[in-house]
Image: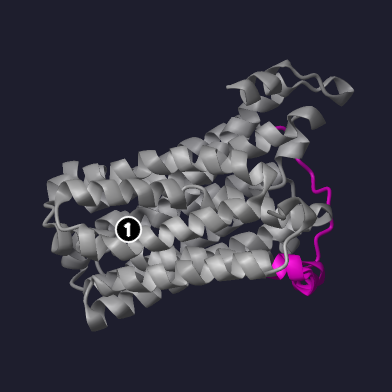
């Protein structure tokens, strides 16, 4: 609340006030929420999607994998490719692509059409997420930039923890196709909001692909990206298949899955804001705690999650820890390359979504080959590896614990 008050009270240069910029910031936050919700929508719907399209749960999980792969590739490529176009126009076009992808997914008569739909979602998601990272500084005065950036990325954080249970609830009340159609309708609403609330945003930076690639030369950036890759791969190897795990280990019926995921989501929102405060002081220390708690919790799900109440507690702790991953890793990377915020953000989005794809793929192989409980051990091991890299890797000065 204090951050929002600061944004509304501050007067910037050239007569631009944060009050005028706040609606645009909120619209961009709505866009980040919508794209990430769309990306992860299949997580809570794998069982009904697999049944309807006549594929295994592991194969249905590829609907998340393909979106992550496309998002990982499109983010660093679209940023330099679209550098000369007005950002408002680009965002509106990408939201239109996202809407078409979701509506096509809702209609898909077979898994091949679903894959095409999820490719479109990946293009929209990767582009929006990468571009949104650098917009706060252009919408509000300098004093309010931090609060505006936090608000924009809160859309990602909230979607990461609430988008899945929301989609699951819609799927339970109606069916999984309605969940995708609802996401498509939301994308169209956000498109209109962006067109109305954002000012013209001509390109400011000339971001070249070579400049993006050269960021890998910085050991601090490499370490941060490695931590992102390990934490997100581990999380999604396990979380993509959380519904079948809960059904097999805890005996939770379809009616309770949405409630358990909502518990996870609410805890995740709290974790986002708690980690945001800690990451501002020391992203390394914050990530050490996050990784350790995440590894332990995921490993305990097959051991202690044999009842619905126990599973609910474990999911709450899981959400609390993973909810802080995005803001903490973003803080690390922005501190490592403050002079190249848009470029490093595109790398972050690429690695993050590549890790989502890899996690969903690895989890699917583990689920089909060794049973759904095995995905928990895989996720825990990767989170533990992230702790080691966080502790031993090179951090930027602002990220030293």
Residue 116 visible to an observer of this rendering: no
| Residue at 27% from the left image edge and 46% from the top image edge | 313
Category of crowding for the residue at label 1, using alpha-carbon neighbours closer than 10 angstroms: few (below 14), some (14–19), many (at least 20):
many
Front residue of 212/118: it is: 212
Residue 146 % position (x, y): 71, 36
Residue 64 % position (x, y): 39, 65
Range drawn in magenta: 199-222
Judge left or right: residue 76 versus residue 229. Answer: right
SS at circle 1:
helix
Front residue of 354/311: it is: 311
Q: Which residue is mark 1?
A: 43
Magenta segment: does it hold 206?
A: yes
Which residue in the rendered view is the most extreme toward the top? 9
Residue 126 % position (x, y): 57, 59
Residue 239 % position (x, y): 34, 61
Judge left or right: residue 57 versus residue 211. Answer: left
Magenta segment: does it hold 215?
A: yes
Q: Does 369 sit above or below residue 138?
A: below
| Residue at 81% from the left image edge and 66% from the top image edge | 208
Front residue of 39/103: it is: 39
| Residue at 69% from the left image edge and 21% from the top image edge | 6
Where on the picture, by quarter, is residue 8? Answer: top right
């Amino acid at each position: 609340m204090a951050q929002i008050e600061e944004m509304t009270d501050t007067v910037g240069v050239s007569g631009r006030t944060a009050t005028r910029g706040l609606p645009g910031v909120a619209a961009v936050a709505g866009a980040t929420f919508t794209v990430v919700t769309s990306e992860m929508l299949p997580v809570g719907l794998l069982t009904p999607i697999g049944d309807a399209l006549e594929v295994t749960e592991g194969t249905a999980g590829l609907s998340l994998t393909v979106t992550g792969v496309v998002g990982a590739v499109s983010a660093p490529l679209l940023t330099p490719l679209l550098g000369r176009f007005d950002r408002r126009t680009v965002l509106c076009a990408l939201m239109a692509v996202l809407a078409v992808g979701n509506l096509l997914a809702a209609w898909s008569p077979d898994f091949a059409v679903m894959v095409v739909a999820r490719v479109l979602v990946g293009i929209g998601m990767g582009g929006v997420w990468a571009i949104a990272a650098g917009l706060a500084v252009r919408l509000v005065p300098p004093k309010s930039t931090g609060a505006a950036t936090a608000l924009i990325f809160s859309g990602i954080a909230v979607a990461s923890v609430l988008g899945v249970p929301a989609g699951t609830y819609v799927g339970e009340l109606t069916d999984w196709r309605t969940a995708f159609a609802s996401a498509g309708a939301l994308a169209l609403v956000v498109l209109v909001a962006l067109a109305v609330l954002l000012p013209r945003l001509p390109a400011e930076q000339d971001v070249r692909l070579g400049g993006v690639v050269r960021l890998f030369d910085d050991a601090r950036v490499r370490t941060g990206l490695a931590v992102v890759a390990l934490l997100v791969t581990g999380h999604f190897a396990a979380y993509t298949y959380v519904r079948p795990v809960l059904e097999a280990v805890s005996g939770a019926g379809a009616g309770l899955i949405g409630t358990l995921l909502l518990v996870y989501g609410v805890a995740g929102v709290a974790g986002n804001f708690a980690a945001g405060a800690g990451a501002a002081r020391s992203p390394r220390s914050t990530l050490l705690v996050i990784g350790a708690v995440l590894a332990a919790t995921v490993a305990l799900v097959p051991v202690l999650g044999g009842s619905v109440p126990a599973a609910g507690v474990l999911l709450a702790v899981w959400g609390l820890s993973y909810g802080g991953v995005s803001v903490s890793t973003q803080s690390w990377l922005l501190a490592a390359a403050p002079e190249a915020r848009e470029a490093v953000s595109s790398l972050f989005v690429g690695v993050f979504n590549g890790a989502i794809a890899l996690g969903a793929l690895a989890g699917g192989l583990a689920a089909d080959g060794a049973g759904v409980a095995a995905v928990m051990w895989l996720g825990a091991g990767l989170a533990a590896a992230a702790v080691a890299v966080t502790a031993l890797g090179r951090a930027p000065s602002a990220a030293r614990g």
